[in-house]
Amino acid sequence: MLNFLKNNNKNIAELIMSDMKKDLHIHTCYSDGIFTPEEVVDRWKAEGYKLIAITDHDGMDGSIIGMDYARGSGIMFISGIEFDSEDALGRDMHILGYGFDYNCPELRANLFEILRRRAIRNDSMMKALNEMGYEITLDDIGKVNEGRYVGKPTFARIMSSKGYISNPQEAFGTVFREPSIRNISKKTFSSESVINLIHTAGGLAFFAHPMEQRHLDESFEEFKPRMYQILDRMTEYGIDGIECYHPSASEEQAELLREYAEQRGLLISEGSDFHSDVSRRDFSRYHRP
């Protein structure tokens, strides 16, 4: 079994590092994206992609469906997931997993625990928003992506559909910054434990979009030393690679990340972090000097 995992990781690493057209960071309706897994496979194939990974937040359903649908379609597909995590150096440290075993008991058990924690948090959020005057019901939640995934983006979409805000993204800069919402903490696993879990499942772990660790009031020169400190910490934890090419990184920043990875023998990945065509995230704030 150990030799199989090593060989599997080697093959996955070769695919990730290949020159083929690829997108290794895509979200579907099984997390906070819009498209179904089938729609993702069809669209990315039509656009000439040769390799993709669906990396829904803290869940495998979209990836499993996408892999099954992609069989024999002419597009290569590897298992993917995106975990949220936290570390002493920062919160919302996202870790991407690739090429893991969907049936790993430890992975499934931990995903169930994440789902349980999220349900408790979502209940608290709904109550807090209702107390603030935003009328949100369980029926409203069930209508968003058929209730497959519930998180802040779900509440933002509901508030937008009811006219409380002009668009879902507005909630993150206004309503979700209110103390009553900010105090509802997200309980996530440590970055080190997530990396170990991905390895236990036979996969490769990548540090996602490092530029998103930059603070709003932080210049890039101020951020650089902290960026390298975070990258060093992830390397100590045994990360296999870095998502160097992501919309949050400018060309110059992407090359700095690539240089770091190459110097330390780490793998390099790229992904669009696609969610929808309708409400695209503004990554430009990470590109400023």
Image (tube, helix red, strand yellow):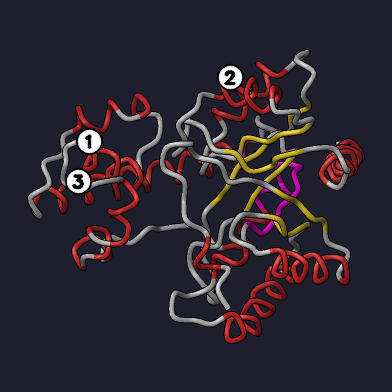
Q: Earlier in the sequence, mark 3 or mark 2?
A: 2
Q: Which residue is mark 3?
A: 126
State which tag comes first along the sequence, 2 or 1: 2
Q: Which residue is mark 2?
A: 38
- On-image quarter of the C terminus: bottom right
Q: Which residue is farthest top? A: 72
Earlier residue among tags 3 and 1: 3
* Element class at badge 2: helix
The answer to whether 113 appears left or right of 93 in the picture is left
Residue 257 x/y as whole percent: 75, 67
Most foreground residue, 198 or 266: 266
From the image, which quarter does the N terminus lie in?
A: top right
Label 2 CA crowd tier, 10 Å (few <14, some 14–19, many 20+): some
Residue at 10% x, 55% y is 132
The nearer-to-camera label among 3 and 2 is 2
Rendered location of residue 136, percent (x, y)? 16, 39
Residue 223, placed above or below residue 191? below
- Could you tell me the amino acid type at mark 2? Glu
Q: Please provide the residue range marked out in magenta.
A: 197-208
Disc 3: CA contacts within 10 A as few (<14), some (14-19) or many (>=20): many
Q: Using the image as rendered, state which of residue 256 and residue 207 is in the foreground.
A: 256
The residue type indicated by label 1 comes to: Ser
Q: Nearer the viewer, mark 3 or mark 1?
A: 1
Q: Which residue is mark 1?
A: 161
Pointer 1: residues within 10 angstroms few (<14), some, or many (20+)? some
List x then y, in percent, for residue 203: 74, 44
Q: Disc 3 to disc 2, how far (Cα)?
A: 31 Å
Q: Quadrant of residue 63?
A: top right
Query: Is there CB contact under 8 Å for labels 3 and 1?
Result: no
